[in-house]
Amino acid sequence: MIRTLLSPLVFVVHTTLQIANLALWGGLVIIFGLIKLLPLGQKVRLFWNGLMHAFMFSFGKVSVFFIRVFNAVDIECAVHGELSKNKWYLIIANHLSYLDIVLLIEFAANRIPAPKFFLKKELIWLPFVGLAAWALDMPFMQRYTRAYLEKHPEKRGKDLETTKASCEKFRTVPTTVINFVEGTRFTEQKHLAKQSPYQHLLPPKAGGVSFTMGAMGHLFTNVLDISLLYPENKKHPMMAMLSGTMTKIIIDVNVTPVPETQVVESGPTAREQIQKWLNNLWKNKDSTIANLLN
Protein backbone atom coordinates (compact mmCIF):
# COMPACT_ATOMS: atom_id res chain seq x y z
CA MET A 1 0.00 0.00 0.00
CA ILE A 2 2.74 2.46 0.98
CA ARG A 3 4.77 1.52 -2.10
CA THR A 4 1.75 2.22 -4.33
CA LEU A 5 1.16 5.63 -2.75
CA LEU A 6 4.81 6.58 -3.21
CA SER A 7 5.01 5.30 -6.80
CA PRO A 8 4.68 8.78 -8.45
CA LEU A 9 7.63 10.10 -6.43
CA VAL A 10 9.60 6.90 -7.01
CA PHE A 11 8.91 7.19 -10.74
CA VAL A 12 10.39 10.71 -10.94
CA VAL A 13 13.51 9.92 -8.91
CA HIS A 14 14.13 6.49 -10.44
CA THR A 15 13.59 7.67 -14.02
CA THR A 16 15.98 10.59 -13.49
CA LEU A 17 18.69 8.26 -12.17
CA GLN A 18 18.18 5.77 -15.02
CA ILE A 19 18.48 8.54 -17.63
CA ALA A 20 21.59 9.91 -15.95
CA ASN A 21 23.09 6.40 -15.91
CA LEU A 22 22.39 5.97 -19.61
CA ALA A 23 23.80 9.42 -20.44
CA LEU A 24 26.98 8.81 -18.43
CA TRP A 25 27.99 5.43 -19.85
CA GLY A 26 26.55 6.07 -23.31
CA GLY A 27 28.41 9.37 -23.50
CA LEU A 28 31.67 7.67 -22.53
CA VAL A 29 31.13 5.02 -25.20
CA ILE A 30 30.65 7.69 -27.87
CA ILE A 31 33.65 9.79 -26.76
CA PHE A 32 35.97 6.79 -26.59
CA GLY A 33 34.51 5.51 -29.86
CA LEU A 34 35.61 8.64 -31.69
CA ILE A 35 39.21 7.88 -30.71
CA LYS A 36 38.92 4.70 -32.78
CA LEU A 37 39.04 6.91 -35.87
CA LEU A 38 42.75 7.33 -35.17
CA PRO A 39 45.23 4.81 -36.69
CA LEU A 40 45.46 2.51 -33.66
CA GLY A 41 47.45 -0.73 -33.56
CA GLN A 42 45.61 -4.05 -33.27
CA LYS A 43 46.46 -4.57 -29.59
CA VAL A 44 45.48 -1.01 -28.69
CA ARG A 45 42.21 -1.36 -30.63
CA LEU A 46 41.35 -4.59 -28.79
CA PHE A 47 42.07 -2.93 -25.44
CA TRP A 48 39.97 0.08 -26.43
CA ASN A 49 37.04 -2.14 -27.48
CA GLY A 50 37.27 -3.97 -24.17
CA LEU A 51 37.13 -0.65 -22.35
CA MET A 52 33.97 0.42 -24.17
CA HIS A 53 32.36 -2.97 -23.54
CA ALA A 54 33.16 -2.41 -19.86
CA PHE A 55 31.23 0.89 -20.07
CA MET A 56 28.25 -0.94 -21.59
CA PHE A 57 28.34 -3.62 -18.89
CA SER A 58 28.62 -0.92 -16.22
CA PHE A 59 25.48 0.70 -17.60
CA GLY A 60 23.63 -2.62 -17.27
CA LYS A 61 24.92 -3.34 -13.77
CA VAL A 62 24.15 0.13 -12.40
CA SER A 63 20.71 0.09 -14.04
CA VAL A 64 19.84 -3.26 -12.42
CA PHE A 65 21.26 -1.96 -9.12
CA PHE A 66 18.76 0.93 -9.27
CA ILE A 67 15.99 -1.55 -10.11
CA ARG A 68 16.78 -3.51 -6.96
CA VAL A 69 17.00 -0.33 -4.84
CA PHE A 70 13.61 1.05 -5.91
CA ASN A 71 11.73 -2.26 -6.23
CA ALA A 72 11.11 -5.10 -3.78
CA VAL A 73 11.93 -7.43 -6.66
CA ASP A 74 12.98 -11.05 -6.78
CA ILE A 75 15.17 -11.71 -9.86
CA GLU A 76 15.41 -15.41 -10.67
CA CYS A 77 18.11 -16.33 -13.20
CA ALA A 78 18.50 -19.99 -14.17
CA VAL A 79 21.11 -21.18 -16.68
CA HIS A 80 20.73 -24.71 -18.07
CA GLY A 81 24.18 -25.48 -19.46
CA GLU A 82 27.69 -24.03 -19.32
CA LEU A 83 28.61 -20.54 -20.45
CA SER A 84 31.97 -19.06 -21.39
CA LYS A 85 33.38 -15.65 -22.30
CA ASN A 86 35.50 -17.38 -24.94
CA LYS A 87 32.70 -18.67 -27.17
CA TRP A 88 30.42 -17.23 -29.83
CA TYR A 89 26.69 -17.13 -29.00
CA LEU A 90 23.43 -16.33 -30.75
CA ILE A 91 20.79 -15.22 -28.24
CA ILE A 92 17.17 -15.78 -29.25
CA ALA A 93 14.74 -14.26 -26.78
CA ASN A 94 11.10 -13.33 -26.44
CA HIS A 95 10.43 -9.60 -26.19
CA LEU A 96 8.13 -8.02 -23.60
CA SER A 97 9.64 -4.64 -22.77
CA TYR A 98 12.54 -2.25 -23.36
CA LEU A 99 13.64 -3.52 -19.95
CA ASP A 100 14.61 -6.77 -21.72
CA ILE A 101 17.67 -5.09 -23.25
CA VAL A 102 18.94 -3.82 -19.90
CA LEU A 103 18.51 -7.26 -18.32
CA LEU A 104 20.30 -9.03 -21.19
CA ILE A 105 23.26 -6.62 -20.99
CA GLU A 106 23.52 -7.18 -17.22
CA PHE A 107 23.14 -10.95 -17.70
CA ALA A 108 25.98 -11.01 -20.23
CA ALA A 109 28.43 -9.27 -17.86
CA ASN A 110 30.94 -11.77 -16.43
CA ARG A 111 29.18 -14.64 -18.22
CA ILE A 112 29.46 -14.31 -22.01
CA PRO A 113 31.05 -11.98 -24.60
CA ALA A 114 29.66 -8.47 -25.07
CA PRO A 115 26.26 -8.58 -26.85
CA LYS A 116 25.69 -7.06 -30.28
CA PHE A 117 22.52 -6.17 -32.14
CA PHE A 118 22.12 -6.24 -35.93
CA LEU A 119 20.74 -2.76 -36.70
CA LYS A 120 19.13 -1.20 -39.75
CA LYS A 121 21.52 1.17 -41.50
CA GLU A 122 19.05 4.06 -41.07
CA LEU A 123 19.48 3.88 -37.28
CA ILE A 124 23.05 5.16 -37.51
CA TRP A 125 21.56 8.67 -37.82
CA LEU A 126 19.44 8.25 -34.69
CA PRO A 127 20.82 10.64 -32.03
CA PHE A 128 22.89 8.94 -29.37
CA VAL A 129 21.86 5.38 -30.29
CA GLY A 130 23.49 5.36 -33.71
CA LEU A 131 26.89 6.66 -32.59
CA ALA A 132 26.99 4.42 -29.53
CA ALA A 133 26.15 1.36 -31.64
CA TRP A 134 28.81 2.31 -34.19
CA ALA A 135 31.40 2.78 -31.44
CA LEU A 136 30.57 -0.69 -30.08
CA ASP A 137 31.06 -2.26 -33.55
CA MET A 138 27.45 -3.32 -33.92
CA PRO A 139 26.74 -4.33 -37.54
CA PHE A 140 24.50 -2.06 -39.60
CA MET A 141 22.47 -3.85 -42.27
CA GLN A 142 21.57 -2.41 -45.65
CA ARG A 143 18.33 -4.22 -46.47
CA TYR A 144 16.72 -3.90 -49.92
CA THR A 145 13.01 -4.35 -50.58
CA ARG A 146 11.79 -6.92 -53.11
CA ALA A 147 10.51 -4.10 -55.34
CA TYR A 148 13.94 -2.41 -55.28
CA LEU A 149 15.72 -5.66 -56.16
CA GLU A 150 13.39 -6.23 -59.11
CA LYS A 151 14.48 -2.88 -60.50
CA HIS A 152 18.14 -3.32 -59.48
CA PRO A 153 18.94 -7.06 -59.69
CA GLU A 154 22.68 -6.27 -59.48
CA LYS A 155 22.12 -5.40 -55.80
CA ARG A 156 20.87 -8.88 -54.96
CA GLY A 157 23.08 -10.39 -52.25
CA LYS A 158 24.98 -7.12 -51.67
CA ASP A 159 23.32 -6.59 -48.27
CA LEU A 160 24.64 -9.93 -47.02
CA GLU A 161 28.11 -9.31 -48.48
CA THR A 162 28.32 -5.93 -46.73
CA THR A 163 27.21 -7.39 -43.40
CA LYS A 164 29.62 -10.32 -43.72
CA ALA A 165 32.45 -7.85 -44.25
CA SER A 166 31.49 -5.88 -41.12
CA CYS A 167 31.36 -9.16 -39.15
CA GLU A 168 34.89 -10.20 -40.10
CA LYS A 169 36.25 -8.58 -36.92
CA PHE A 170 34.17 -11.08 -34.91
CA ARG A 171 36.12 -14.01 -36.36
CA THR A 172 38.94 -13.59 -33.83
CA VAL A 173 36.98 -11.95 -30.99
CA PRO A 174 34.27 -14.00 -29.18
CA THR A 175 30.93 -12.29 -29.71
CA THR A 176 27.27 -12.55 -28.71
CA VAL A 177 24.49 -11.54 -31.11
CA ILE A 178 20.97 -10.84 -29.78
CA ASN A 179 17.88 -11.40 -31.92
CA PHE A 180 14.28 -10.76 -30.85
CA VAL A 181 12.64 -13.03 -33.41
CA GLU A 182 9.07 -11.90 -32.68
CA GLY A 183 10.00 -8.58 -34.30
CA THR A 184 8.09 -6.51 -31.74
CA ARG A 185 7.15 -6.43 -28.08
CA PHE A 186 4.43 -8.83 -26.95
CA THR A 187 1.02 -7.37 -26.06
CA GLU A 188 -2.37 -9.05 -25.81
CA GLN A 189 -3.60 -6.89 -28.69
CA LYS A 190 -0.76 -8.01 -30.97
CA HIS A 191 -1.25 -11.60 -29.83
CA LEU A 192 -4.89 -11.51 -30.97
CA ALA A 193 -4.19 -9.52 -34.15
CA LYS A 194 -1.51 -11.97 -35.30
CA GLN A 195 -3.66 -14.99 -34.32
CA SER A 196 -0.63 -16.48 -32.64
CA PRO A 197 -0.69 -20.28 -32.24
CA TYR A 198 1.26 -19.84 -28.98
CA GLN A 199 -0.23 -18.97 -25.62
CA HIS A 200 2.53 -16.66 -24.38
CA LEU A 201 4.41 -15.69 -27.54
CA LEU A 202 4.01 -13.97 -30.90
CA PRO A 203 4.91 -16.00 -34.03
CA PRO A 204 8.69 -15.99 -34.69
CA LYS A 205 10.13 -14.50 -37.88
CA ALA A 206 13.04 -16.22 -39.59
CA GLY A 207 14.33 -13.20 -41.53
CA GLY A 208 16.65 -11.76 -38.88
CA VAL A 209 18.06 -15.12 -37.80
CA SER A 210 18.51 -16.22 -41.42
CA PHE A 211 20.41 -13.01 -42.17
CA THR A 212 22.54 -13.42 -39.03
CA MET A 213 23.31 -17.04 -39.85
CA GLY A 214 24.23 -16.11 -43.40
CA ALA A 215 26.61 -13.43 -42.15
CA MET A 216 28.33 -15.26 -39.29
CA GLY A 217 26.54 -18.55 -38.58
CA HIS A 218 29.77 -20.50 -39.02
CA LEU A 219 31.21 -18.72 -35.97
CA PHE A 220 28.50 -19.57 -33.43
CA THR A 221 29.31 -22.29 -30.90
CA ASN A 222 25.87 -22.29 -29.21
CA VAL A 223 22.41 -20.77 -29.28
CA LEU A 224 21.11 -19.31 -26.01
CA ASP A 225 17.34 -19.68 -25.87
CA ILE A 226 16.32 -17.06 -23.28
CA SER A 227 12.84 -16.65 -21.80
CA LEU A 228 12.16 -13.32 -20.07
CA LEU A 229 9.13 -13.02 -17.78
CA TYR A 230 7.55 -10.41 -15.52
CA PRO A 231 4.84 -12.68 -14.08
CA GLU A 232 3.25 -10.16 -11.71
CA ASN A 233 3.66 -7.06 -13.93
CA LYS A 234 2.71 -8.35 -17.38
CA LYS A 235 0.96 -5.30 -18.84
CA HIS A 236 3.53 -2.52 -18.31
CA PRO A 237 6.84 -3.95 -17.02
CA MET A 238 8.84 -0.79 -17.73
CA MET A 239 6.38 1.49 -15.95
CA ALA A 240 6.12 -0.92 -13.02
CA MET A 241 9.92 -1.04 -12.73
CA LEU A 242 10.31 2.75 -12.81
CA SER A 243 7.44 3.23 -10.33
CA GLY A 244 8.87 0.77 -7.82
CA THR A 245 6.10 -1.82 -8.10
CA MET A 246 8.03 -4.55 -9.94
CA THR A 247 7.97 -7.71 -7.78
CA LYS A 248 9.41 -10.57 -9.84
CA ILE A 249 11.64 -11.11 -12.89
CA ILE A 250 12.48 -14.50 -14.38
CA ILE A 251 15.41 -15.06 -16.76
CA ASP A 252 15.54 -18.66 -17.98
CA VAL A 253 18.48 -19.62 -20.23
CA ASN A 254 18.84 -22.84 -22.22
CA VAL A 255 22.23 -23.49 -23.85
CA THR A 256 21.41 -25.34 -27.09
CA PRO A 257 23.30 -26.47 -30.22
CA VAL A 258 23.43 -24.33 -33.36
CA PRO A 259 20.70 -25.58 -35.75
CA GLU A 260 21.87 -27.88 -38.50
CA THR A 261 20.91 -25.54 -41.31
CA GLN A 262 22.76 -23.91 -44.13
CA VAL A 263 24.63 -21.38 -42.01
CA VAL A 264 27.00 -19.90 -44.58
CA GLU A 265 24.76 -19.09 -47.52
CA SER A 266 21.47 -17.21 -47.36
CA GLY A 267 18.46 -17.99 -49.50
CA PRO A 268 14.89 -19.29 -49.54
CA THR A 269 15.90 -22.85 -48.61
CA ALA A 270 18.01 -21.77 -45.63
CA ARG A 271 15.26 -19.42 -44.50
CA GLU A 272 12.66 -22.21 -44.64
CA GLN A 273 14.90 -24.49 -42.60
CA ILE A 274 15.45 -21.80 -39.98
CA GLN A 275 11.71 -21.03 -39.85
CA LYS A 276 10.94 -24.70 -39.11
CA TRP A 277 13.63 -24.75 -36.43
CA LEU A 278 12.27 -21.54 -34.88
CA ASN A 279 8.69 -22.85 -34.90
CA ASN A 280 9.77 -25.94 -32.99
CA LEU A 281 11.89 -23.86 -30.60
CA TRP A 282 8.96 -21.51 -29.98
CA LYS A 283 6.60 -24.41 -29.29
CA ASN A 284 8.95 -25.69 -26.60
CA LYS A 285 9.50 -22.17 -25.26
CA ASP A 286 5.75 -21.67 -24.93
CA SER A 287 5.55 -24.79 -22.78
CA THR A 288 8.56 -23.66 -20.73
CA ILE A 289 6.97 -20.27 -20.06
CA ALA A 290 3.70 -21.91 -19.03
CA ASN A 291 5.59 -24.09 -16.55
CA LEU A 292 7.55 -21.11 -15.18
CA LEU A 293 4.38 -19.09 -14.69
CA ASN A 294 2.72 -21.94 -12.88
Image (tube, rainbow, N blue to C red):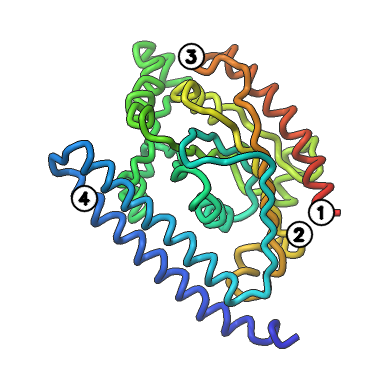
**Which disc number belongs to residue 231?**
2
Q: Earlier in the sequence, mark 4 or mark 1?
A: 4
Amino acid of disc 3: Glu
Residue tagged by mark 4?
34
Neighbours of disc 3 within 10 Å: few (<14), some (14-19), many (20+):
some
> Residue 225: x, y in percent?
65, 38
Kind of residue at disc 1: Leu
Which residue is located at x 41 percent, y 64 percent?
A: 22
Q: Looking at the rendered structure, which numbered label has been put on residue 293? A: 1
> What's the distance in space between the residues labelled 3 and 4, CA to CA?
34 Å
Q: Is mark 3 on a helix, strand or loop?
A: loop
For the residues bearing labels 4 and 2, Cβ distance under 8 angstroms: no
Classify mark 2: helix, strand or loop. loop
> Real-space Cα distance between discs 3 and 1?
39 Å
Query: Could you give the CA–CA distance between mark 4 and mark 2, rounded to whole angstroms?
Result: 41 Å
Q: What residue type is labelled 4?
A: Leu
Viewer-closest of 6 and 32: 32
Q: Residues at badges 2 and 1 in contact (C-beta under 8 Å)?
A: yes
Q: Dot 3 corresponds to which residue?
A: 265
